[in-house]
């Protein structure tokens, strides 16, 4: 599949492994001001503004206010949000601003609006652009200089990655979600396990995932070092895209679907590397350390660095355990938490909110927690379904859409030394605030941890039928 998309977009080849590629869609957010500034300094404007889409997400406040900009008290953050609007207007770029009903996290609204489509090459100045590969696109993050090149020319020089297929067969047991699958993969191959590769996820467990679940898997491909993650489009993909704002319409739809059907890898296609996993053997996953590779099943304990032969890995484990305030042999289940966070481009779609709400319904959280939906549209849908009332009744704050506590640059942060059960994609040192301690897990697992006040196995709370439905 990757080879098909790559070859269709080559404008000019240079050697055997480098090409100038046409870029179909380019996404920008507040952090794109460097590229806009460099473009203006060169006396240029965005060459194809209809193929670039801007959205405010990283610096927008999650605290609800009308207008939302009124909740931005930091002048630098306010300037970032307003500068994106000015740059978009100056270049004729479609801008989903802070109060636009289509606003949301860039990697949520791209698929949601139909901007993301199978067979496209997509770029964004954000590492988690790999999310869009869930619809069969080749999507990857770029730096400021590359972003300037895309905006100026709608083209980009790229070295050709190698291919890596990860087959996840079998059927995932109850309580095991897309987040658990991708954490298990990263724990298996490591944070550098897919470096230099585009990963294609395949197998019955992947095909069984909803589109929301597929986006979770592809989103965290970057945490394994991959250039991108992809899942072949199928009928579920087509049903998801049909009728969305930027999806093809009428006869163009039929032509698009006919092309999309040609994208999946041919039978017998060869890959530079392959790995197989059996979903039936998996359990809910939790991280204990300071990168996503530091993940184990909820029934396991913090590992002992002394048992690891590789020196570099052993040193990392020692440092991670010390930072997290844990000790080797400590069971994951039972570790107290001080905060719970549900959100981010990994797990803030409607399916994620339903799964968390199913656990929280009729229960109370023992710790402060908040929910930041992945988009304003997701927020509206959740409210229409009454999920906001479930979260509020459980003691969670119900907030507005944005990146929120993922990067902790909009005021949503965890105090130093305190522990957070989080649905985000990264648990690096200080990621959710200086000195904060982050445990990555699925939305249902975060909800379970909040109810217990400690990391716990969500399967122990799975008696309610809604939980079984939303985790299936």
Image: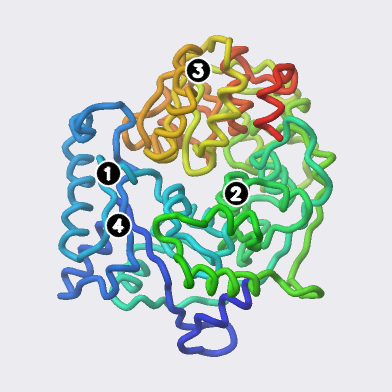
Q: Dot 2 surroundings within 10 Å: few (below 14), some, or many (20 or more)?
A: some
Q: Earlier in the sequence, mark 3 or mark 2?
A: 2
In the image, 181: left or right of 61?
right
Find the distance from the CA under tag 4 to the CA under tag 2: 28 Å
Identified at 50% across, 29% down, the residue is 342
Identified at 40% across, 33% down, the residue is 380
Circles 1 and 4, Cβ within 8 Å, touching? The answer is no
Find the distance from the CA under tag 3 to the CA under tag 2: 24 Å
> Which residue position holds label 4?
32
> Which residue position holds label 3?
390
Secondary-structure class at tag 1: loop
Residue 378 visible in rendering? yes
Q: Earlier in the sequence, mark 4 or mark 3?
A: 4
User: From what the image shows, is residue 453 above or below residue 444?
Assistant: above
State which quarter of the image contains the C terminus: top right
Identified at 51% across, 89% down, the residue is 13
> Which residue position holds label 2?
211
Front position among marks 4 and 3 = 3
Q: Earlier in the sequence, mark 3 or mark 1?
A: 1
Q: Nearer the viewer, residue 202 or 302?
A: 202
Disc marking residue 100:
1
Q: Nearer the viewer, residue 153 or 412?
A: 153
Disc marking residue 311:
none
The quadrant in which residue 32 appears is bottom left
In the image, 182: left or right of 74?
right
Secondary-structure class at tag 3: helix
State which quarter of the image contains the N terminus: bottom right
């Amino acid at each position: 599949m990757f080879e098909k998309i790559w070859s269709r977009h080559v404008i000019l080849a240079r050697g055997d492994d480098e090409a100038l590629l046409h870029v179909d869609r380019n996404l920008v957010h507040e952090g794109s001001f460097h590229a806009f500034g460099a473009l203006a300094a060169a006396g240029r404007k965005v060459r194809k503004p209809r193929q670039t889409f801007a959205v405010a997400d990283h610096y927008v406040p999650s605290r609800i206010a009308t207008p939302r900009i009124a909740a931005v008290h930091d002048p630098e953050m306010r300037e970032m949000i307003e500068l994106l609007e000015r740059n978009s207007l100056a270049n004729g770029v479609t801008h989903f601003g802070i109060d636009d009903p289509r606003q949301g996290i860039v990697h949520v609204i791209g698929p949601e609006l139909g901007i993301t489509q199978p067979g496209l090459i997509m770029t964004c100045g954000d590492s988690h652009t790999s999310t869009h590969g869930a619809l069969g696109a080749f999507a990857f993050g770029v730096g400021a200089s590359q972003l300037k090149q895309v905006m100026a020319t709608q083209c980009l020089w790229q070295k050709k990655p190698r291919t890596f297929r990860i087959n996840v067969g079998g059927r995932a047991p109850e309580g095991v979600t897309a987040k658990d699958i991708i954490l298990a993969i990263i724990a298996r191959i490591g944070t550098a396990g897919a470096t230099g590769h585009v990963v294609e996820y395949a197998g019955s467990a992947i095909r069984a995932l909803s589109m929301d679940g597929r986006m979770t898997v592809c989103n965290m491909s970057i945490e394994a070092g991959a250039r991108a993650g992809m899942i072949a489009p199928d009928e579920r993909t087509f049903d998801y895209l049909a009728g969305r704002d930027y999806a093809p319409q009428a006869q163009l739809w039929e032509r698009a679907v006919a092309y999309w059907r040609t994208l999946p890898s041919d039978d017998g296609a060869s890959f530079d590397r392959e790995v197989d996993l059996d979903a039936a053997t998996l359990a809910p996953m939790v991280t204990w350390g300071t990168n996503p590779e530091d993940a184990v099943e909820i029934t396991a304990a913090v590992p002992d660095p002394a048992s690891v032969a590789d020196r570099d890995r052993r040193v990392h484990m020692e440092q991670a355990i010390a930072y997290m305030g844990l000790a080797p042999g400590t069971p994951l289940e039972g570790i107290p938490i001080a905060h719970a966070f549900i959100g981010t481009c990994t797990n803030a779609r409607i399916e994620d909110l339903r799964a968390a709400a199913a656990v929280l319904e009729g229960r109370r959280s023992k710790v402060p927690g908040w929910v930041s939906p992945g988009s304003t549209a997701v927020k509206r849908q959740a409210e229409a379904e009454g999920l906001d009332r479930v979260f509020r009744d459980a003691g969670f704050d119900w907030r507005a859409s944005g990146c929120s506590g993922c990067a902790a640059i909009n005021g949503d942060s965890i105090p130093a030394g305190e522990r957070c059960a989080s649905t985000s994609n990264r648990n690096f040192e200080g990621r959710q605030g200086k000195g904060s301690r982050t445990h990555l897990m699925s939305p249902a697992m975060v909800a379970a941890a909040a109810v217990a006040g400690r990391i716990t196995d969500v399967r122990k709370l799975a008696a309610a039928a809604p939980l079984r439905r939303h985790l299936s």
